[in-house]
């Protein structure tokens, strides 16, 4: 797997004028090869610089979210499988805000498309989904492209400290509403 990633990055670096298109395309095939988004964003910062790498990463990640939207609409079994995974990991009634999802995307080991599913469930329509996706994709592209070399050289202890520092921020940005179902509130029992 490492050799494949190295080979693909070498092809992108020697791509000349087509290098940005190859890099954006690499974002689109990323889920097939199970490459983390962080790896590609860091590579974009190294190959294209901070500003151009961020722009290309935002375009690639947003197009990847667009493809995810289309695939979920065409494959309901995939949607059901991801919904069950979300229910196991986050809870059945978990509703995350776009700001929370943007912060969760900064954590490298959280599944990118699981968070896209959270955006899909919170969105009213396609336009709202794409706006929320773009908003939540910008922080991951900026952070890992600008600070890619710095983050990759962090010790494991500093990385764990960074992750624990994000947890209170995610908690404070949660939705502050509680929804009770009618039956739970009045403790209605259906009997036979």
Image: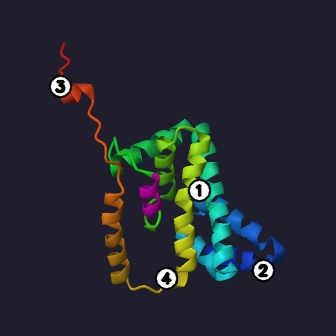
Kindly identify the residue that appears in the image at 60 percent across and 71 percent down: 40
| Residue at mark 3 to residue at mark 4: CA–CA distance | 53 Å
Query: Pointer 3 and pointer 4: residues touching (CB < 8 Å)?
Result: no
In terms of secondary structure, what is the magenta stretch mainly?
helix
Q: Nearer the viewer, mark 1 or mark 2?
A: 1
Seen at 28% across and 41% down, the residue is 178
Label disc, if present, on residue 152 of the rendered structure: 4
Q: Earlier in the sequence, mark 1 or mark 4?
A: 1
Is 134 colored magenta in this rendering?
no
**How packed is label 4: few (under 14 Cα within 10 Å), some, or many (20 or more)?**
some
Q: Which structural element holds mark 1? A: helix
Percent position of residue 72, x then y: 57, 42
Calculate the distance from the C-alpha at mark 2 to the C-alpha at mark 3: 66 Å
Q: Are marks 1 and 3 in contact (CB under 8 Å)?
A: no
Comparing 24 with 88, the one in front is 24
Query: What number is the disc on residue 186?
Result: 3
| Image quarter (top left, top right, bottom left or bottom right) of the N terminus | bottom right
Q: Residue at x 34, y 41 (%)?
A: 93
In this view, 178 is above or below 136: above
Identify the residue position indicated by label 2 in the image.
14
| Magenta-drawn segment | 98-104
């Amino acid at each position: 797997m490492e050799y494949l990633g190295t080979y693909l990055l070498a092809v992108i670096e020697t791509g000349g004028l087509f290098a940005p298109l190859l890099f954006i395309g690499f974002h689109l095939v990323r889920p097939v090869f199970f490459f983390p988004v962080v790896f590609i964003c860091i590579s974009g910062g190294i190959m294209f610089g901070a500003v151009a790498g961020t722009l290309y990463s935002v375009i690639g990640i947003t197009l990847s979210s667009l493809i995810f939207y289309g695939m979920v609409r065409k494959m309901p079994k995939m949607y059901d499988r991801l919904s069950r995974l979300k229910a196991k990991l986050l809870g059945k009634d978990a509703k995350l805000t776009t700001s929370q999802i943007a912060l969760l995307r900064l954590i490298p080991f959280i599944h990118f498309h699981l968070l896209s599913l959270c955006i899909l469930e919170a969105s009213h329509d396609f336009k709202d989904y794409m706006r929320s996706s773009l908003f939540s994709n910008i922080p991951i592209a900026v952070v890992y492209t600008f600070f890619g070399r710095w983050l990759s050289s962090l010790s494991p202890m500093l990385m764990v400290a960074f992750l624990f520092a994000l947890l209170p921020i995610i908690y404070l940005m949660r939705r502050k509403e509680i929804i009770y179902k009618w039956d739970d509130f009045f403790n209605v029992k259906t009997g036979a």
